[in-house]
Each structure stands twice: as structure tokens, then as C-alpha cells.
């Protein structure tokens, strides 16, 4: 990362499209508003499938400003998908695993609690849909925890093996994701 690299900044007024050009990778979740604003808007420009299903302790909203795709939800009754396009507001219920699957590059704002809450990165079997592994955390900078969760999952055949059917998941591709760089900036 170079020192001259721009990134979205916390401001009182926000031009989402201008700030969106500054994002570094998919699912950056750069905080946009002043500390304490509730709900807190977080900006991402997503072009690859979300590496895992995100589970949060609080309800969230996902506002799509540009792009198309689907949001996949894992519920006790199975998998449900909802399509998104510009102007779509998707309700992400607490404790429900959800994953963004963009068909085209999507500029999205996630509205979430202003203070850190319980989150989990959940990985599901591609053969039988069983939960293969999850990592729970609470963090001021969740981007670092997201990165660490995927690196740990990728590095462990045991974590990638489904206990129900025995399928071993392929390592998750992190190209197009800049969580480590984002975390470094947010920690500074």
C-alpha cells in the first residue's frame, strides 16, 4: 500500500459514488459517517462473491447504489436468495447467515450498529449445505478478523472438511479483497 493511496473518509456529507471510487477491494466496509452516527454507514464496492456468510448479532440494512446480484440467506428451512439492483434495500436479520453474490460490480452501503457487536464468519458445505466452520468475534476493526478467519480456514483441511458428508472445501480466493490494508488504515 502506498502512502498516496486515497480511501473513503468519515464526513458529514457523503457523495457515495465519489467515495466509492476510492474503495480498495470487495467488502471493504469503510466507515463513512462521524463516530457515533446510528446506524453507521459503511461503504463497499463488491465485484467478487463474499468469501463467507456473515452472521451479526444486530439487524443490518444493505443499500445497493449500483450493480446487480443476489444476497443468499441460510435459514433453518434452507437457502433463500433475494435479488438486488440500484435502489434495493435488503434487510439482513440478526443471527441469519447472509452472503452477497454480485453479478456485476455493486456499490453498496451497509447500515450497521455504531459500536462493535458479535459477528461470525460462517462457511457452508457446497455439497450438503451443512455448516462446516464458523469463527465468532467482536472487534473495533472487523476487517482484520474477516481476513484472519479466511486465512485460518484456508490453512486447515480440518476446518474445511464437512463433518456431515466429508466434502473438503477448496481454499477461499481472497483476490479482490483488501481487508488487511483496510484494517491497517482503520487501526491507525
Image (cartoon, rainbow, N blue to C red):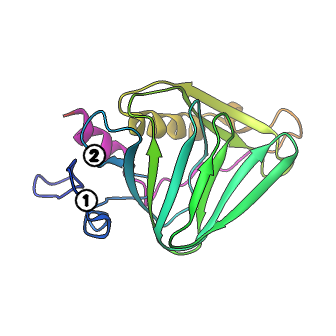
Q: CA distance from mark 2 to mark 1?
A: 8 Å
> Which residue is drawn at the image coordinates 65% and 38% (left, top)?
122
Residue 125 lies, with reference to residue 56, above or below; the image says below
Q: Residue at x 48, y 39 (%)?
A: 146
Q: Residue at x 16, y 58 (%)?
A: 5
**Residue 77 in which image quadrant:** top right
Please tell me how crowded label 1 is: few (under 14), some (14-19), or many (20+) other residues with Cα within 10 Å.
few
Q: Secondary structure at mark 2?
A: loop
In the rendered structure, does residue 172 fall within the stretch colored magenta? Answer: yes
Task: From the viewer's perspective, tell me whether residue 144 is left or right of residue 152.
Answer: left
Residue 117 versus residue 53: which sits nearer the camera? 117
In this rendering, position of residue 129 left or right of residue 107: right
Q: Choose the circle earlier in sequence order: 2 or 1.
A: 1
Kindly give the residue lying farthest to the left in the view shown. 4
Report helix, strand or loop for mark 1.
loop
Q: Position of residue 181 (x, y in %)?
A: 29, 46
Q: Nearer the viewer, residue 163 or 51?
A: 51
Q: Are marks 2 and 1 in contact (CB under 8 Å)?
A: yes
Q: Which residue is mark 2?
A: 33
* Residue 146 colored in magenta in the image: no
Q: Position of residue 74 (x, y in %)?
A: 75, 46
Residue assigned mark 1: 14
Image vertical order of residue 60 relative to residue 81, above or below? above
Q: Nearer the viewer, residue 174 or 70?
A: 70
Q: Which residues are magenta?
A: 168-187
Classify the position of the C terminus by image quarter: top left
Amino acid at each position: 500500500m502506498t502512502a498516496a493511496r486515497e480511501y473513503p473518509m468519515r464526513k458529514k456529507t457523503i457523495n457515495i459514488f465519489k467515495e466509492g471510487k476510492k474503495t480498495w477491494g470487495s467488502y471493504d466496509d469503510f466507515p463513512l459517517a462521524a463516530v457515533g452516527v446510528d446506524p453507521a454507514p459503511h461503504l463497499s464496492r463488491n465485484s467478487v462473491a463474499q468469501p463467507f456468510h456473515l452472521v451479526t448479532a444486530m439487524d443490518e440494512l444493505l443499500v445497493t447504489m449500483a450493480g446487480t446480484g443476489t444476497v443468499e440467506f441460510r435459514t433453518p428451512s434452507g437457502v433463500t436468495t433475494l435479488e438486488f439492483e440500484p435502489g434495493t434495500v435488503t434487510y439482513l436479520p440478526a443471527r441469519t447467515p447472509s452472503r452477497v453474490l454480485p453479478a456485476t460490480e455493486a456499490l453498496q452501503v451497509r447500515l450497521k450498529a455504531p459500536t462493535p457487536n458479535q459477528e461470525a464468519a460462517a462457511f457452508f458445505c457446497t455439497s450438503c449445505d451443512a455448516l462446516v466452520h464458523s469463527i465468532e468475534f467482536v472487534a473495533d476493526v472487523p476487517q482484520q478478523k474477516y481476513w484472519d478467519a479466511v486465512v485460518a480456514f484456508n490453512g486447515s483441511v480440518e476446518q474445511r472438511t464437512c463433518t456431515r458428508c466429508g466434502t473438503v472445501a477448496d481454499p477461499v480466493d481472497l483476490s479482490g479483497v483488501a481487508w488487511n490494508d483496510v484494517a491497517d488504515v482503520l487501526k491507525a
